[in-house]
Amino acid sequence: MKTKIISITFLLLLIVTTGKAQNNAQTSSSRLFSIYSVSLITSWYKPSMNYWNNTFLPSAGSTDKFNGNLLFGGNITFNLPLHLGARVGVWYWQDKVNGGQDATFNSLRIGFTGFSLGAFYRYPKPVVYGISPYAGIEGSYFIIQNKYDVDGDVSKMSGYDISGMPFIGIERVFFQKLVIGLEYGYVLGRYRQDVETNEGSSNPKVSVNGHKMGITVGYKFP
């Protein structure tokens, strides 16, 4: 269901922005602000998850840890003056740990659904073999969804927070339309997790700091 929501959102954004770009192609404003590309993203993201890995899982008798997983998403990128650019996107990441034989739970699945907005600077000319470098910063509003299974009794929790990510990347255009790139970013953020134990309730911080490295494949507009 989450994947379908992301797909539908991305397609709606594509239809709206494509229509606007076509309608305004001959106006002077299009020279200052125009759609550059629509891309799909596949990245490896490994958030810290320090509370879960260092406190909760050991105390629950589990030897498993959150070790990172694939992140999927999409971006719509725009040209701005002075070799600047902007992008909006959606993404989804999840990971799961198992309790094991001696643990007090069966499994814990945590997922993030994010909506991002970023700005960057692209080097004016390709530096070598048609490759263009760029660098920028991005912010995300992300929704946290937990699914906790204890002997078949499943409880769900949800929340939200924000994160930031400086990033660098390189890209190359093939056949005048196909954009392929590599990008590295470091996510900075955290969220509060409500926890109920025999000792009472607590509200620990969960770090989502971590490396994110991935591949982008997209369509470049004229």
Image: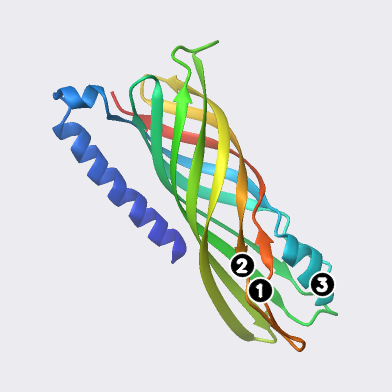
Residue sitting at 51 percent across and 64 percent down?
Answer: 160
Cα separation between marks 3 and 1: 21 Å
Q: Are marks 2 and 1 in contact (CB under 8 Å)?
A: yes
Q: Residue 105: name its quadrant.
A: bottom right
In depth, the one of 202 and 173 nearer the eye is 202
Cα separation between marks 2 and 1: 6 Å
Q: Quadrant of the N terminus?
A: bottom left
User: What element does badge 2 sit on?
Assistant: strand
Question: With 92 as the anchor, is 23 left or right in this view?
Answer: left
Classed neighbour count for the residue bearing mark 1: other residues with Cα under 10 Å, few (<14), some (14–19), many (≥20):
few
Sequence-wise first label, 3 or 1:
3
Residue sitting at 42 percent across and 38 percent down?
Answer: 39
- The residue that disc 2 covers is 192
- The residue that disc 3 covers is 62
Q: Amino acid at mark 1?
A: Asn
Q: Amino acid at mark 3?
A: Ser
- Where in the figure is residue 81, as x and y percent of width and height? 33, 22
- Where in the figure is residue 95, as x and y percent of width and height? 64, 61
Counting every numbered tag in the picture gives: 3
Q: Residue 173: name its quadrant.
A: top left
Instruction: Single out the mark in the foreground, 3 or 1.
Output: 1
- Which of the labelled discs sits on residue 203, or is there none? 1
Residue sitting at 53 percent across and 11 percent down?
Answer: 127
User: What element does badge 3 sit on?
Assistant: loop
Sequence-wise first label, 2 or 1:
2
Cα separation between marks 3 and 2: 22 Å
Classed neighbour count for the residue bearing mark 2: other residues with Cα under 10 Å, few (<14), some (14–19), many (≥20):
some
